[in-house]
C-alpha cells in the first residue's frame, strides 16, 4: 500500500512536468509498480532456472578427456 502511494506520487510528478494534470501519470505509476512486483520476481526465478539447466547440461555433456 505504501509502495502504491509512492509510485502514484512519482507518476504524478512526472506527468505534471508537461504542465497538464497528473492523474494519468499517477495511475500509470501505480499500475507499473503492481506489474513490476509480479514480473520481476518471476523473471528472476525463470532466469535462475534457465541458468541452472544450462550449467547442468554443460556439466554432464562435457567430453571425457
Image (tube, grey):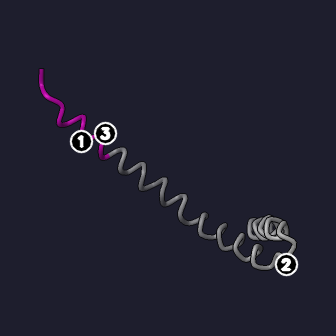
Residue 63: image location, x then y, percent = 14, 28
The residue at the point 72 percent across, 69 percent down is 29
Q: Quadrant of the N terminus?
A: bottom right
Answer yes or no: do the residues labelled 1 and 2 have beta carbons within 8 Å? no
Counting every numbered tag in the picture gives 3
- In the image, which is nearer the foreground, mark 1 or mark 2? 2
Q: What is the span of residues highlighted in magenta in the rendered image?
A: 53-65
CA separation in Å, label 1 and label 2: 54 Å
CA separation in Å, label 3 and label 2: 51 Å
Residue 60: image location, x then y, percent = 19, 36
> Which type of secondary structure does the marked residue at label 3 adopt?
helix
The residue that disc 1 covers is: 57
Tag 2 or tag 3, which sits nearer the N-term? 2
Residue 51: image location, x then y, percent = 37, 45
- Residue 55 image label: 3
Q: Is residue 64 above or below residue 39?
A: above
The residue at the point 59 percent across, 69 percent down is 35
CA separation in Å, label 3 and label 1: 5 Å
* Secondary structure predominantly adopted by residues drawn in magenta: helix
The residue at the point 85 percent across, 76 percent down is 20
The residue that disc 2 covers is: 21
Amino acid at each position: 500500500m505504501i509502495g502504491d502511494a509512492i509510485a502514484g506520487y512519482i507518476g504524478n510528478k512526472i506527468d505534471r512536468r508537461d504542465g497538464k494534470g497528473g492523474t494519468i501519470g499517477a495511475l500509470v505509476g501505480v499500475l507499473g509498480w503492481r506489474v513490476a512486483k509480479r514480473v520481476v520476481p518471476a523473471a528472476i526465478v525463470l532466469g535462475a532456472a534457465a541458468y541452472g539447466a544450462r550449467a547442468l547440461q554443460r556439466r554432464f555433456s562435457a567430453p571425457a578427456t
